[in-house]
Structures are given as C-alpha cells and as structure tokens.
Amino acid sequence: MNELGFPMISLVTFFPIFGVLILMFIDKEAKDTIRGTAMVFAMIEFFISLPLLFSFQNGTAAMQFVERHAWVKSAGLSYYVGLDGISLWIIMLTTFLTPICVLCSWTYIQKKVKEFMICLLLLETAMLGALVSLDLILFYVFWELMLIPMYFLIGVWGGDNKIYAAVKFFIYTAAGSVFMLLSIFFLYYLNYKTTGIFTFDLLELYKLNIPVSTQFWLCLAFFVSFAIKVPMFPLHTWLPDAHVQAPTAGSVILAGVLLKMGTYGFMRFAIPLFPYASHKFTPVIATLAVIGIIYGALVALIQPDMKKLVAYSSVSHLGYVMLGIFAFNMQGVQGGLYQMLNHGISTGALFLIVGMLYERRHTRMIKDFGGIAKVMPVFATFFMIATLSSIAVPGTNGFVGEFMILVGAFRTLPVHTVFATSGAILGALYMLWMYQRVMFQPLDKEENKVLKDLNSREILTLLPLALLVFVMGFFPGYFLRKMDASCEHFLKTYQQQVAMYEHGQYDSGTPRLAGVLEKNNLKSTFVD
Amino acid sequence: MLDFVVPALNLKAILPQVLLAITALTVLLVDVFAGKEGKTSLGALSLVGVAAALIALLLTRGSFESAYAGMLMADGFGFFITLIVCCVAFLSILAAMNYERVSPEIKSGEFYCLLLFAAFGMSFMGNAGNLIMVFVALETMSISIYVLAGFKRDNLKSIESALKYFLLGAFASGFLLFGFALVYGASGTLDLVKLGKFFTTHPETLHNPMVMGGIALMTVGFGFKVAMFPFHMWTPDVYEGAPTVVTGFMATGVKAAAFAALVRVFFVGFAPLQADWTTIMWVGALLTMSIGNLVAISQTNIKRMLAYSSIAHAGYILVAFVVGSELARSGILFYLLGYAFANIGAFAVISAMGSRDQEYTELVDFSGIGFKFPFLGLMMTIFLFSMAGIPPAAGFMGKFFIFSEAIKSGYIWLAIFGVINSVISLYYYLGIIVRMYFREPEREIEIIAPAGTMIAALSLAAFGVLQMGMFPSYIWNLARESVKMIM
C-alpha cells in the first residue's frame, strides 16, 4: 500500500464529496446550518490533510503515499495517485484556502447558499484530484472537472457581466486542454509502439525517448494548455474577466489554486515529459514570462478598479513563477514553487480585502475611496500586510520567492532578469499607489465615514493568511526543505536528458531512455 | 431445381425479440378489451415486456450462433445492440408514461405497440446476417417510427414530421434496396458471410462497377438513417415535430440500429473493400460533425439544437467507423450506449417540460429552470456535459476510446478535427446551461410535476451516464467482447 498503510490521499481527495452529500439533504432555507456544515467539512478536510504534511519524507524524490488500482485494465487506465515535494505544498494550500473561502462567503453570498457551498466543495475535490493524479487520463478527468464548479461559481454568483466571463473562462480552458488530450493519446501510442505496453502511467511515460520533431508538437500542445491556465501573455485575456466577475471566494480559489495548476502542470507534466523541447522553448517562454511581468504590471498601474488591478498583478506574479521554473536551476525552480504559494496567500488576501470593501460599499473603484485607514484601522493593517507581501518586502514571504527567482534566473537568463527586475519596481508602484489612494488621502466621501471596521469573522478570515506571510517570510527553510529532493531530482533528470539529446546521443534505435543511459554509462536518476 | 430446406426453429436465438413482439401484441389486445381504466396499465405492461426481453437477453449472453440458415446472427455484436435497444425502449416507455399527461394522444395501445415493434425491428437490424434480413428489419423499424412521429394527429408539425420522414425514408430505403440488388447481381449472394468470402476469393470483382455502385447506394441508404452529411437534412424537422419522447427514441434507437447494420454489412460483407470507402467516409465524418455542430449553435429551439447535435455525434461515431480497427468498433458500441443514455435523458427532460397540451421547447423557456426545477435542471446538466464530452460522464469516455484509437491508427487529423468540434459543441451545450442557471426566467411556465416514472427514467439514465463515465471498465470489456464475437 503506502507509508501510512491507509489510502490517505483518496480520503483527503474525496472527503469533500461527503460534505456535498450531507449538504444536499439540508433544507435550503436553513442558510446558517448550510454555512456551518460546509465550514465544518472544510476544516476537517484541512486537518485530515495535515498527516500528509507531517509524515512526508524529506529526503526522497519518490512519490509518496502512493495508491494504485486498475481502472480500465485493457486500455491501460489506472487510478494512480501520489504526491511529492512539488505537489505537497500546493495540496496544503488548497485545503488551507477552502475554509477561508467558506468563511469569506458567509455574508457575501446570500442567494442559493446551498448550491454555492456544494460547488466550493466539489471544486476542492477536483483540484486535489488533479494535484495527486499520476495517471495522465485521471489527471485530465480532474483537470476538466475543475472547470464545471468554477464555471457555476462565476456564472451564478458573479457580477453583471458574469455570463460572458464564465463562458469565456470555460471555452478558453477547455479549448486548450483538448489538444493536450490528443497529445496524451499520442504519447500513449508512442509508448505502446516502443514498449508494447498500454499505459497512461506518468512515471513510465517519463522514461520514453521521444523523437525531437514529435516532441516539439506534443510539447506545444501541453504548453498551450498550461499557458492558458497560468495564464501567460498573450493567453491571459480570460483572467481579468473571470476575476472581476467571480464572487470573492471564486477569485481566491482561482488565484490561489487554479492558476497554480498551470505552473504545476509545467513542472509535473510538460517539462519532464518533453525535456529537450522545453529546453528549446526556454527563450520563448522566458520572453513571454518577462513580457507578462511588465505588461501585467503596467496594465495594473492604470486600472481604476481594485479587483482588476489585483487580477493583472496576478499576470505579473505568475510571470515570475514561469521565469523561475525556466531558469532551470535550484534557486529558480524552488523560488518559482515558493512564489506559487506566496501568490496564493498574498493575492488571496488581496481579493478577500477587496471583497470586504465591496461588501460595505458595493463599489470597487479606487476613486470612490480615500482615507479609509482612519475609519478602519484593523482593516488597514491587514491590507498593508498583504500589500507588502505582494510587493515582496524583506521579512514577508514574497521577498523569499522573488529573490530566489531573480537570483536563479540571473544565472541562466541575465538579460531577461534585468527586465524582470523592473517588474518588481512597477509592482511596488501600483500596489502602494493603490494603497495610498484608497487608505490615505482625505476622507472626503460621506459614505466612507460610516464604514465599520472588520468584525471578528473577517479578522478570523484574514488572520491565518497574515500570519503565514510572516512565517513563510522568516522561516522559509521548513517549506523549502520539503521541496529540496523533488526539485533536485526534477533538475537532474532534466539536465541529464537535455545533455543526452544535445550531444547527439539520442539514438532512435534505443527506444527506452534507460537503454540510452546504459550505453553511455550514465546512471539513471529515475526513481520508481 | 432449387433445394429448399426449412431451417430449424431456434427459439433461443430470438427469445428477446420474440418477447418484444409478444408484448407488443398483448398491449394491442389489452387496449381493445380493457376499456378506459386498462389504458393506464399499457405502459406498465410494455415495461414488463421490455424488462423480460432484457433478462432473456442477459441469460443468453455469450451464445454465438447463426440461426435460420444464416439469416440471423445471434452473436456478441447483436447482443450489445439488443442491449442498447432494450435500454432505450425501457427508458422511452418510462418517459412516455409521464408524457401521456402532457400529450394525451399517445395514451393508446397503438403507441406502445408501435414502439415495441420498432424496438423489435432495431434489434433484428443488429442481428441480421443477410441483406434481405437487414432490409426487412429496417422497414419494420422505420414504418413504426413513421407512424410514431405523426402520433399527434392534430398537430401540424407532427404531421409534417411524419410525412417528411416517410417520403425521404422511402427514398432512402429504395436506394438501399437497389444497392442490395446490384451487389446480388455481382456476387450472387445476399448472405453477409458468403459475401465476405466471395470478395476474398474473387478479388477481381472488387472493382466491378456493380459492386461499387451497390456500395455507393447502400451508403446513401444507411447515411440517411444515421443522419450523415449530406443526407441529414430531414433530421431537424422530423425531430422537432415528432412527439418529444419519440424524438428521444429515434435519436438513439434508430441511430444505434442503423450504425449496427452499417458496421455489420461493411465489415462482414465488404471487409476487403475497406480501403475504398475510407476516403469517402473520412470526408463524411468530418463534414457530418462540423456541419452538425456549427448549425446547432444558431438554433433557438432545443429539439432542433439536439437534432443537430445528434448529427454531430453521428460524425464522431463515423470517425471510429473510418478507423475501423477492432477497438474502434468497440468504441462505436460504447459510444452508442453512452450517447443513448444521455440523449434519451435529455429528451425526457424536455418532454417533462410541459403542461397539458402545452410544451416548452424554445430555448427561452429554459431560462432559470435550473433553480426553479432543481431535479430536472441537474439531470439536464449531467446529460449535456456528457454530450459535450466533459468528464466524468460517459461522453468523455466514449470520445476517449474513439479518439485514442484514431491516433493509434494514424488518423491524427481526423482526431484533431474531432476535438476541435468538441470545443465548438461546448458553446451551445453550455448555452443551455447558461440559460438554465445563469439567467432569470423570461416567461411564466407551468409544468406538470414529473411523475415517479419520469424520475425513475432520468435517474436511471443519469446513473448510466455517470457509471459509464467513472467506471467504464465493465461496459468497455463487454463492448470489446461483443466485437470479437462478430461472425
């Protein structure tokens, strides 16, 4: 079975479904009972995911807590799940953010509460499933499944232009992923041709030696699909629409976890499956990432709408993550992974903050505010913490991530990094400028003078995030240590394979990578 | 002097079909003698008959025999088609028992009797081992369906639907029959197995104009029944006008039976000619799915929209037909069953959207019903996601099997067009969901609360869709076994 002798991952993944089943039987008028039940389930879910963190073995890059059962044996489908240092923290982030989402929707969502909570819990299962899947089709199933609840979250509880945003979100993402599906089929077929085995097992497919020209096309399909999700410039246009229209909880989940699916996809699927093509694509991806960083920041600068500003800042932040991953060294990759978590926390917090203001004033326009710090001092503190984290001030989590990315990227992509650094300055500019216009300046609007400060529920919503900003800022070691082995393995495998292709040691007569390695007296780094 | 041997009676080979026929006749008799109260039990009686046929079918599973001098092939393939037909008939009857209250005309013995006879014909189409048998079964099915389509006697659209279907269908049958005749002229046999042997032993006849012409005419005839481009024109009008339950029945049952006959005739009778039809069918598959999906986008009536969607689905199945490998043919069977559950379910939901003599089939009527009628909304959503091929529904697994096989066999472009089409189709399937959940009601609509039978029909269909989507193993193995056991 696995280390715990218990299907822990399955329990964590499917536990929210129990919540959904219970919720279905609650009267839809009993709104507080519904909220309470959802909250209890989200909390229990978080606690049962903790054993994954605590029993995680630091020293190994192998998949842990693995479970494997045949699904459709004849077609090579299996229910194959497990996690490693790359997915561990994103899984923890997911289970951590969901209760916060329930909490922040307590009063924000007034109509169709039951359906809302059901969507939220279903979404959690889908996200966790995608993160733990080690079978490509299983992954694809969860990947598409994520769209359905999110589509409803935006479409039913969204703003004025919700239908446009929801449909755009769905079609953009689905269009990208069907080509990934074809690419998966092709891999499956290629694997069958070389080994005679039908399998969608990711770890088996890693070992496949793919001819360079084929690799290019397959890789492109994966890249487009993940790049839409990240989103990378110029495929980002769905994001501001989706964010602005989505309810607060939707935005938090979208920014916190869904976007990470794209970057996670690069690290788990696209790069290890197609190392040489990824290597060749690096200049393109890095350039697009840098354009994303600067473009996102510049567009954020001129946004009159706070939520849109935060949405564009996401484009910029995710650009850093991509730059870090494609630096292909330890600092860059770890920094990228760290920045994924940071972005989930700081941007999540910012969306919560914007949502809280919106709930009070029913506007998100920066010009409608001013001097809010005087009437809402507690709120101002939290806002400041999130802002500082977002602009990566030393002592906050953002600093660790951004610093590592820039250090790492400078070693391999110096020119790109120089430009990327300007994004950090722009970041400080748009965030602080927004903060200044909203929180300081004279308190000249009557409506703003009577705003109430945060209540205890709202403080409870923001407090865990604010604490994490500092914990992750001061003690990055604990977090990074758990990623070490996996990141190292990720890089080593990548570099070894690229070197192999580069030096022409690729031999079409030797279908399996292991064979090529043996021929060249190299030691395989694959761990089964 | 011709030898004429009376073939041995083999009841086991045709037991499910016989049960269907007996039930049909019993229903007719009960209708005459039972009076008014008896009419309410007609549906239930038919249900029992279909269930009996289904049980008989499952009991004879695994048999593998050619009965009645090769006229009938009681093999795995026929088993699977009969399974689909029985499921379709069962769900249609359940839905019809609710639809009786919306559209009282159908509350008569003839309705259930014809429905059962149509199922009887469909099942024989899947089992036919001889071209004559194919034709007789096809006509048994078609004539019943022509009448069913026009069952709402006082409704102009229904009459139009029946007349159109009858006229065009008669032409299509003519083409088909003429095609059979030409093939007979060239080969001297109508028996599919013998045809296959003949073409293998006489390769010089392969490109005989009579054979080629015969195949072309047969393609027209079958193409009409499966709604393949350019023989799909009748579909939207007929689907729109026919009573909704009948629409669901013919969208699934007729399609399954016609595809079954198509596969059996082409792969058993004309297997050596596969290379010749591949190109035509390649283009046919591409155009069928593209036209179906593109035209569906602009529809405002949900029945017409689903009619075009069913054309598109025929296109996906044709992709598997072009690929033609054993696994692709298993894919056809799997897809047909998954498609049947989703489509019967969707049409059942539409048939439930009505009050006495008033049906709501315009898209605007669906605005806001998701929250107004949560059960119908949820069911419709499941069926639509299945048709769109979104996991974890049966439609996804069906497309998975078909497209992965297409790639494996080197039809990469066809697979690419297939998935592009899936994305296009998302737009209109999502459009219905957008209306149901994201918009407020635009018209005041009153519907009769769905009866227990409707709830049962929808739950069963949804169960089928989700079961095949999440745990496809069982049905997939069944489909593979069935295709292996084609004679």
Image: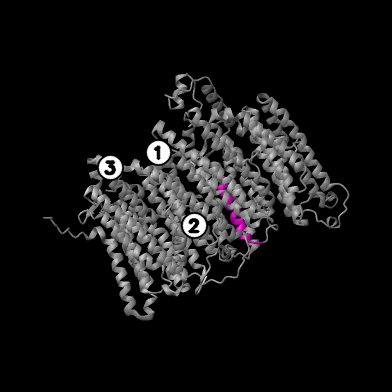
Instruction: From the image, tell me which residue sits under label 3.
Output: B206
Q: Nearer the viewer, residue B472 or A161?
A: A161
Numbered disc 3: secondary structure: helix
Numbered disc 2: secondary structure: helix
Type of residue at label 2?
Phe
Image location (x, y in percent) of residue A451: 82, 56
Instruction: From the image, tell me which residue sits under label 1.
Output: B409
Type of residue at label 3?
Leu
Among numbered discs 2 and 3, the one appearing first in the sequence:
3
Q: Are marks 2 and 3 in contact (CB under 8 Å)?
A: no
Magenta stretch holds residue B357: no
Q: Main secondary structure of the magenta part?
A: helix
Q: Which residues are magenta?
A: A111-128
Magenta stretch holds residue A113: yes
Can residue B74 be seen? no
Image location (x, y in percent) of residue A11: 53, 48
**Where, quadrant-wise, is the N terminus of chain B in this rendering?**
bottom left
